[in-house]
Image (cartoon, rainbow, N blue to C red):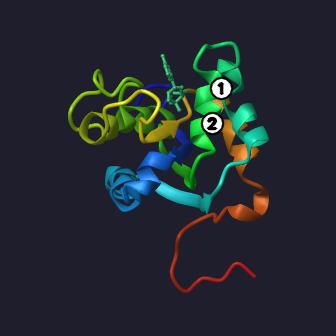
């Protein structure tokens, strides 16, 4: 095991195209099949202010306004996903930003064609994961472990 290997939590979003195309179940199944666990999940509409904050690192890019417009155009799913090296594991599952370059077998490689409508967003570093999780979730949104028959109260 390399020294950087550890359990971590990352942020994943199913974009409006994924929800509209009813691919939520397939995408969540891929994450679970990999061995990752859901810690929080919400179906919601993203407000413009939160969308701008979420994509703040792209604010000077020519596609920023269109990206914010698109990501607020329909319901999305936001998730906190946990597991061994989760940030890198999820990025591999999701595939390259441009779906034409995403390898077959990855979500973008198998299910989309367009760089804006590229199905899923996943945090690209532990620092980004931490920032994005705190933007989309509060402490009350998390479950610590998924166990049947155990109550948190
Ligand atoms: P995502 O992983 O959500 O992170 C930033 C998003 O910006 C990216 O996916 C794409 O949807 C979008 N994006 C990145 N590069 C471009 C580009 N050249 N043109 C349009 N959109 C882009």
Q: Are marks 1 and 2 in contact (CB under 8 Å)?
A: yes
Q: Nearer the viewer, residue 69 or 61?
A: 69
In the picture provided, is 104 more to the left or to the right than 83? left
Residue underneath mark 1: 65
Residue underneath mark 2: 69
| Residue plotted at (77% across, 58% down) | 139
Q: Quadrant of residue 99?
A: top left
Can the viewer see residue 58 in this picture?
A: yes
Residue 47 lies, in percent from the top left, at 73, 47
- Respond yes or no on whether mark 2 lies under 8 Å from ligand 1: no
Residue 135 lies, in percent from the top left, at 75, 43
| Residue plotted at (75% across, 44% down) | 134
Q: Quadrant of the C terminus?
A: bottom right
| Residue plotted at (51% across, 37% down) | 122
Q: Quadrant of the N terminus?
A: top left
| Residue plotted at (57% across, 38% down) | 70
């Amino acid at each position: 095991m390399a020294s950087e290997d550890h359990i971590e939590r990352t942020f994943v979003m199913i974009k409006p195209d994924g929800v509209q195309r009813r691919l939520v179940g397939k995408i969540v199944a891929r994450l679970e099949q990999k061995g990752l666990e859901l810690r929080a999940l919400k179906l919601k509409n993203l407000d413009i202010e939160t969308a701008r904050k979420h994509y703040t690192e792209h604010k000077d890019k020519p596609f920023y306004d269109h990206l914010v417009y698109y990501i607020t155009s329909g319901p999305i799913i936001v998730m906190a996903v946990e597991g061994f090296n989760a940030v890198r594991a999820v990025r591999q599952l999701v595939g390259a930003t441009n779906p034409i370059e995403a390898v077959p077998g990855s979500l973008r490689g198998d299910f989309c064609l367009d760089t804006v409508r590229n199905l899923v967003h996943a945090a690209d570093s532990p620092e980004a994961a931490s920032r994005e999780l705190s933007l989309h979730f509060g402490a009350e949104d998390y479950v610590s472990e998924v166990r049947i028959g155990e109550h948190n109260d």
